[in-house]
Image: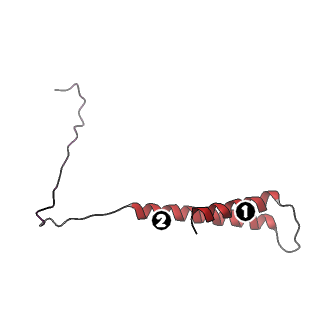
Amino acid sequence: MGIGGSIFLIAIGAIIAFAVDVQVGWLDLQVVGWVLMVAGAIALVLLLINSNRRRTTVTSSDPRDPRAVRQDTYESTLPDDRI
């Protein structure tokens, strides 16, 4: 299920919870709507966490490789007016 499916669950849950006024004998439709909205929100949060984790890449280079170049940068923390 992707972002669209999660938003769909949230939308259908909101419609069932807030807009539908039908009485079913043993089933409370407001609870079903809230359950769908919570399930959609949890799925959306998990999907965003998982996609964020997938974007991070870790690269390592062999220090013995002559093509590996290390660049160190230094930023001064002193104000510009100090000499």
Question: How far apart, in angstroms, are the residues tagged by discs 2 and 1?
Answer: 24 Å
Q: Which mark is residue 12?
A: 1
Tell me: 58 left or right of 72: right
Q: Is residue 74 magenta?
A: yes
Residue sitting at the far bottom: 26
The mark closer to the camera, 2 or 1, is: 1
In the image, what residue type sits under mark 1?
Ile
First of labels 2, 1 by sequence position? 1
Tell me: 79 left or right of 27: left
Viewer-proximal residue among 8 and 10: 8
Q: Are marks 2 and 1 in contact (CB under 8 Å)?
A: no
Q: Is residue 78 magenta?
A: yes
Tell me: 57 left or right of 24: left
Q: What's drawn in magenta, residue-wise?
A: 65-83
The colouring scheme, among rainbow, by chain, secondary structure or one colour, is secondary structure
Q: Quadrant of residue 13?
A: bottom right
Tell me: 55 left or right of 73: right
In the image, what residue type sits under mark 2?
Asn
What type of secondary structure mainly makes up the magenta span?
A: loop
Residue for badge 2: 50
Residue for point 15% across, 57% down: 69
Residue for point 22% across, 40% down: 75
Q: Quadrant of residue 20?
A: bottom right
Locate the N terminus by quadrant. Answer: bottom right
